[in-house]
Amino acid sequence: MTRSFRNPARCSFRAAATARSRSSRGRAVAVAGFVAAALLVAACSGGTGAPGSSTAPINKGEPIRGQRITVLLPSFAQIPKPLLADFTRQTGVDVTLNSASFDSLHQQLVTSFVAGNTIADVSEVDWSWVGQFGHAGWYTPLENELPSALLSDMQLAPFRSNGHLYAVPYSNDFRMAAYNTDAFRKAGIAAPPQTFDELSADMVKLQRADPRVFPLTLPLSAGEGTATQWYLLTLAMGGQVFDDKLQPAFGPGTAGEKALQFEVDAVARGWISRGAVSNTNQTSDARFTGGVAAYIFGGPDELVVADDPTSSQIVGKAQLALVPGVSGPGATFGLPEGIGIPAGSKHKAAALAFVQWMTSPGVVTQLRDNLGVLPARISVLRQLTAAGKLKGGPVIQAEIPHIVPLFPQGAPAWYPKFSNEAGALINSAAKGDISVAEALKRMAATARRLSGT
Amino acid sequence: MTAETRVQLPDPSLPPDGTTSRPQDWRARSDRRLGWLLVSPLILLLLGLVSYPLADGAITSLWTSDPVNGVPNRFVGLGNYRDVLAAPETRAALLHTFAYLAIALVLEIVLGMVFALTLRRPFRGRVLVFTALVLPWALPGVVSGLLWTRVFDTDNGVLNSLLLQLHVTSGRHAWLASPLLSILVITVVHVWGVLPLTVLVLLSGLNGIPADLYGAAAVDGASRLRQFWHITLPLLRPAVAVALTTGTVAALAIFDEIYVLNGTALSTRSAMMQVYDTTFRQLDFGHGSALSILLTVVTIVLAAVWVVAFRRVAR
């Protein structure tokens, strides 16, 4: 009969312990159920995969009046509302214009495509995304959808991949050179350099003439802009980044090696600030327009920015120049901004009408007036130059024949991965963390790994 | 109103059917139901915004993913985890992240303690100091990174100008050119943003310590240092555990400050940047998810270590 003599306090402790144990079990069951439910919901949902999209031809006869399309563009290309209203008046198509910072656009688009969604009927397509987007089938081929008069009036090579055209440019951009005439005059230099030998000699003169002004500025931070600058120097020095089979063409003794050595030496010799290892394209531009650096490789709009009194210290002192080369002006390449139609768009005919409208001569001229973007239509560029309405027009026109495609056969799908790694390795070489040879070796290994060779 | 016409209100402690058997049981059941009802929106929110993405990430991490080439996803089990742990760039990123973590936690706890002890006592302008202290916490990482670029800029930065004016250095330093220095600089910027939270946590812990203990210790002749060592520190341990946990979570997720100050440089790339790079730049969702799940596990383990270790010592 020991049960009746149990210590009541002990009994209540046991009861409490049992209750706690039950409560703990309950909590554990609840947590397990919670986790199981989450796993079940996640497992039953779509997951990652290619979008269920169609690349069938666009039905141009489809009535589009009354439709609404969504257009996603970077913040620097926001079309003014009155101009958009013109499109709606002409076509009866309403437009929702969304903007995002350029840096976040790629991520937004990729995330939506991988999830099987389409966040826009017309979107920005940077030349560097073309291989990746085209290969994945995320965009509608346009080579048979647009009039030949339009296509023959543009530089389309950067937007072709696997034999298809995935976007058309609305903004024309290519690499040129720009220099501070004041700094050059003080250094006793009469004309901008035509070759890299002349450029090196001029750098020394500029350095001696005014130690407060750096002769050169380059982006050298770990980023896309840094890789792009090296590609330009490689092409300008007479080389290629990749050969016809997309194999690395920047081994020992090549223009690619000389180009990277030029950048590393420029830091070592003090032609560029040592702080340039943190320079992006924007901060490099700011050094030029701030009067801190005398020479830059930039876009045709460099002159517009340099002459803007609200942001520039060198108003009226900048001039454009041809990219130097080995024995005369060198090659350069285009970095245009384009627009394309995602394959999952539900209003492709209306989207196509928008693409045609946005790339029409009248609209590209108005975009230049309102946003400052260089027209992508060659005929419009000629007209503006002839009318004297384009700053640096004659030099811009002289540079255009030197433009060569970075990838004659179209950008490979793995290009964004490569350029990301290349930017980081060039940055490491500029800092002195690794040698030029090591950087190039690792870049080549990355290219081979990505291309599967 | 007469007594006869008065409405007899039910006793809230009784069940609605009027039975009087075991009212406590009915009440407990009712309370439980109400509790579940009240927390159900939160449970749904957690299920949707935390558990679902986490579970989806865990599942994705077990599969290959190559959306660009349109290759069907293939189950690889823990293969993605093995790959990311073997990759030199992941190892480097993890090493950098643990460096950020170690330096950040030391700075946050030491400086946090100094600020909290200072702000514990009332003084003129205390509110202003509080406001100034909390401000960096309110700033997004990108904004504080941009502000600090003006400090550490080689040619126009405040720090170099100051050092030159004070004749501490003869030339301008490229603060972000050296791997070790750049990790230190980035950690300082990170700590600047997290420190206010640490101070607030430690300050709330300090305010919870009864003043009587210090009075009694003073009567016994204990010095300020002995009071700090034998009263403040032991009783502050739970708050330190919270501060260490929040500091760990913030340091393991470090991204914005690095990206703004040094881009995706190999010498300062953090694990979270490696996740971003793998997932969104390389579009390798399998390996990216594996690395993010690993980071989540590390965060949970470290947070548990701080809580268990400091709770045990406090007891």
Image: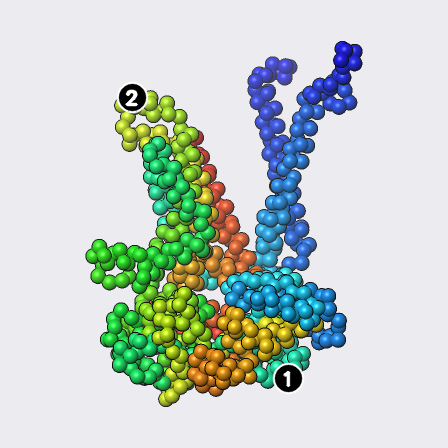
**Quadrant placement of the C terminus of chain B:** top left
Q: How is the image coloured?
A: rainbow
Kind of residue indicated by mark 1: Ser
Residue drawn at x 35%, y 32% as measured from the top left: B122
Which mark, by number, is residue B310? Answer: none
Front residue of A311/B265: it is: A311
Q: Nearer the viewer, residue A29 or A382?
A: A382
Q: Which residue is mark 2?
A: B220
Q: Residue at x 76, y 20 (%)?
A: B18
Residue B105, given in percent of the width and then of the height, sits at 39, 46
Is disc 2 placed on a helix, strand or loop? loop
Residue depicted at 48% across the width and 86% down the height: A401
Residue positioned 61% across, 54% down in the render:
B56
Q: CA distance from mark 2 to mark 1?
A: 96 Å
- Discs 2 and 1 lie in a common subunit: no
Residue A31's place in the image compared with A176, above or below, is: above
Amino acid carrying label 2: it is Asp
Foreground pick, B43 / A330: A330
Q: Quadrant of residue A266?
A: bottom left
Residue A240: x, y in percent? 45, 82
**Quick check: B310 left or right of A9?**
left
Indicate the quadrant where residue A111 lies.
bottom right
Using the rendered view, name the quadrant where residue A253 is placed. bottom left
From this viewpoint, is residue A441 visible?
no
Residue that numbered label 1 is attached to? A148
